[in-house]
């Protein structure tokens, strides 16, 4: 009996104050982490849109350099290649998917503007990306092919 009373008196555990302190600390951590994670997810979706656009643009550059015929694109102000045509011709494995809806973009095409000294490519992916050049998407200035020189610069496709 004596041992039983000692066991009951010797109860160990956390006090209410200690439990509340832990809950407050977890709340503060959650308040900091949730917005940060939301921002990371938003940035990742934007990066996925840009990667899709760059993939489509580079496929169109390859198609144009290979002599593939450009076609008038409905809803645009020029001629170029749709994602569907690039897939059908083998320049692109699959049409790019919108990372926010996991479905095809409502419109996916590249307009090719061929002037005397350069070729410019402008990509459109639904309402997310509209008439953007490679420089707009990657922050560099490699969206055109300079046809006035006969040399290759920084991995660009140069047409003669």
Image: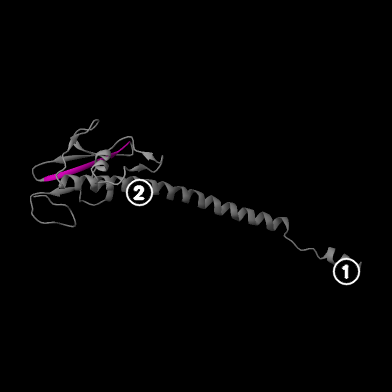
Q: Is residue 139 rendered to the left or right of residue 36?
A: left
User: Tag 2's secondary structure?
Assistant: helix
**What's the magenta region?**
118-126
The front one of 7 and 155 is 155
Rendered-image quadrant of the N terminus: bottom right
| Position above or below: 58 against 71 | below
**Eyeballing the image, is 40 above or below 122?**
below
User: Could you say which disc has been placed on residue 47 in the image?
Assistant: 2
Residue drawn 19% across and 45% down? 63
Q: Position of residue 105 (x, y in %)?
A: 34, 38
Q: Position of residue 26 (x, y in %)?
A: 59, 54
Which residue is nearer to you in this view: 41 or 39? 41
Q: Could you say which is closer to the camera, residue 31 or residue 38? A: 38
**Mark 1 closeness class: few <14, some 14–19, many ≥20 residues within 10 Å:** few
- Residue 3 image label: 1
Please tell me whether residue 55 belongs to the stretch shown in magenta.
no
Q: Main secondary structure of the magenta part?
A: strand
């Amino acid at each position: 009996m004596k041992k039983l009373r000692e066991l009951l008196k010797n109860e160990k555990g956390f006090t209410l104050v200690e439990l509340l302190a832990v809950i407050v600390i977890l709340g503060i951590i959650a308040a900091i982490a949730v917005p940060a994670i939301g921002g990371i997810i938003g940035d990742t979706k934007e990066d996925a849109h840009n990667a899709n656009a760059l993939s489509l643009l580079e496929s169109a550059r390859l198609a144009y350099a290979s002599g593939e015929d450009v076609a008038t694109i409905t809803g645009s102000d020029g001629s170029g290649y749709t994602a569907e045509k690039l897939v059908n011709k083998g320049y692109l494995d699959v049409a790019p998917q919108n990372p926010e809806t996991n479905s095809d973009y409502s419109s996916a095409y590249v307009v090719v503007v061929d002037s005397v000294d350069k070729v410019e490519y402008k990509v459109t992916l639904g309402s997310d990306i509209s008439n953007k050049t490679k420089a707009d998407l990657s922050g560099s200035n490699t969206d055109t092919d300079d046809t006035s020189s006969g040399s290759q610069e920084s991995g660009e496709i140069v047409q003669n």
